[in-house]
């Protein structure tokens, strides 16, 4: 089952016109359909749901799942019985296959997330088409007719700031787009967050994008470059994603670029989960997603209070269904209608902004690196189960690495040390010392492994 992007675009418009009741009916039908399909095609879900009613229209009736559970039952989780963890791992170990169709049918994406544990996810065309349609709806609502016209006059070019050396969903999707061609492929270009800032600035100055989309921490670094006059681009829209922002961050970006700033809150498990509004709230795309703020016992958290965690249900992906999946973030559901006028549920996300590490370069200037530059480096290293980087002094990093079962810990450490040293050298930070932490990565009080810990935190 793979609805076209054009059909889905018409459907999402129709859903908004029908109002909350129409959206609720769509959501209930889609959930019932997905649960029935998961039961029939996934041994994992067949076992998990064996005692549930035949038709499920309320996600609260479902057991909670999480990344560890699904990864532990990977082969049984997939609804396509040709998919195995061994095949997916072999696929993601080959950088030449980024964006290629796994088994001729699917996109594969990897992530570590807040737990620091690697996730391997298989995404079908239906999911990708829904994501495209929902995102197009958000862009149109953000810009309005005049904004769209201005973007066209500016060339309509998209600059996507992504990690370009792994099977991350942003770069994998971009690579797929380039490989399969079409008009959209000519209007988007990926820019690597691994590039030294001076080179990234030069490339963006040459490209002059109408849209700047990417990780919040990288956009904040580019904002400083724009304020200093080294970057001089005039995008119509800037869309930070992946990390929590404050209102002052949003205001600073808008002032520096003279652009509209709209944020998004999403995950690889549901890239279209929500989009931000002018009032600073994230609106859930509830025709294709279910979001449940819950306490530690997975009971609903009242509106106006921050949750212990949040459960999401992706109603599009059928090859590896994410049903009542614990995303691990703390969110608050707005208790009253949002002043922006959007009728869908509005949430705030409680969390840290990106943990940017700043170092003295030894040449009288500071150099900052976004957390993604470090996390994507470790995510693609074989043998790394968990990692944590702590800045213990201005020019010292202490690195804690837990090797995967069966991996040689000393060999894993050596490749981690070598990779991190190269990354620092590429950014003219040869003066930074990398120390090996013999202790395991530290956990937060909530049980998560924070991967990047700045100085004096």
Image (cartoon, rainbow, N blue to C red):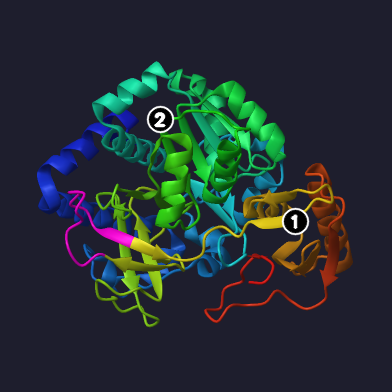
Callout 2: SS? loop
Q: Quadrant of residue 72?
A: bottom right
Q: Does the magenta stretch mainly form a helix, a strand or a loop?
A: loop
Q: Is residue 399 magenta?
A: no
Which residues lie in the magenta part?
Answer: 334-347
Q: Name the spot of residue 407 as percent of width and height, x first.
A: 81, 65
Q: Name the spot of residue 243 as percent of width and height, x first.
A: 50, 55
Residue 296 shown left or right of residue 344 in the figure: right
Q: Name the spot of residue 158 as percent of width and height, x first.
A: 48, 29
- Visible residue check, residue 36: yes
Question: Considering only order in the chain, which callout, 2 or 1, is on the residue closer to the N terminus?
Answer: 2
Residue at image point 51% right, 61% down: 76
Residue 427 shown left or right of residue 203 in the figure: right
Asked if residue 66 is positioned above or below residue 270 in the image, the reply reads: below
Callout 1: SS? strand
Separation (CA) of disc 1 from disc 2: 32 Å
- Residue at the spot of label 1: 359
Q: Is residue 341 magenta?
A: yes
Judge by depth and name the residue closer to the eye, 36 or 216.
216
Judge by depth and name the residue closer to the eye, 18 or 88.
18
- Residue at the spot of label 2: 236
């Amino acid at each position: 089952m793979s609805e076209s992007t054009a059909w889905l675009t018409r459907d999402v418009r129709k859903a908004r016109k029908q109002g909350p009741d129409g959206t609720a009916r769509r959501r209930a039908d889609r959930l019932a359909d997905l649960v029935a399909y998961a039961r029939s095609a996934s041994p994992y879900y067949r076992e998990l749901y064996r005692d549930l009613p035949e038709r499920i229209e309320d996600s609260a009736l479902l057991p909670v799942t999480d990344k560890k559970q699904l990864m532990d039952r990977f082969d049984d989780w997939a609804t396509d019985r040709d998919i195995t963890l061994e095949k997916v791992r072999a696929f993601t170990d080959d950088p030449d296959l980024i964006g290629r169709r796994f088994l001729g049918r699917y996109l594969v994406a990897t992530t570590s997330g807040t737990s620091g544990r690697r996730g391997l996810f298989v995404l079908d065309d239906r999911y990708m088409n829904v994501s495209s349609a929902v995102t197009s709806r958000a862009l149109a609502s953000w810009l309005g007719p005049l904004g769209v016209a201005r973007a066209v006059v500016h060339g309509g070019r998209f600059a996507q700031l992504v990690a370009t050396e792994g099977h991350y969903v942003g770069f994998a999707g971009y690579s797929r787009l380039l490989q399969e061609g079409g008009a959209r492929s000519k209007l988007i270009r990926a820019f690597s967050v691994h590039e030294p800032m001076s080179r990234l600035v030069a490339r963006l100055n040459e490209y002059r994008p109408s849209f700047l989309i990417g990780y919040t921490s990288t956009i904040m670094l580019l904002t400083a470059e724009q304020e200093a006059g080294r970057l001089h681009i005039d995008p119509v829209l800037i869309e930070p994603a992946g990390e929590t922002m404050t209102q002052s961050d949003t205001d600073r970006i808008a002032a520096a670029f003279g652009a509209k700033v709209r944020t998004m809150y999403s995950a690889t498990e549901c890239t279209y989960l929500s989009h931000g509004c002018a009032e600073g709230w994230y609106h859930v795309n509830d025709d294709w997603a279910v979001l449940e703020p819950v306490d530690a016992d997975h009971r609903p958290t009242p509106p106006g209070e921050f949750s212990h965690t949040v459960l999401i249900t992706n109603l599009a992906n059928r090859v590896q269904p994410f049903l009542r999946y614990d995303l691990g973030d703390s969110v608050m559901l707005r208790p009253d209608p949002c002043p922006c006028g959007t009728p869908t549920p509005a949430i705030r996300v409680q969390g840290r902004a990106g943990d940017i590490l700043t170092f003295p370069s030894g040449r009288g200037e500071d150099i900052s690196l976004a957390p993604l530059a470090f996390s994507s480096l470790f995510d693609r290293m074989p043998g790394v189960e968990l990692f944590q980087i702590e800045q213990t002094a201005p020019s010292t990093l202490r690195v804690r690495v837990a090797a995967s079962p069966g991996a040689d810990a000393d060999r894993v450490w050596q490749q981690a040390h070598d990779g991190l040293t190269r990354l620092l050298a590429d950014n003219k930070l040869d003066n930074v010392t990398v120390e090996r932490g013999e202790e395991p990565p530290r956990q937060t009080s909530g049980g998560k492994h924070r991967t990047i810990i700045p100085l004096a935190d």
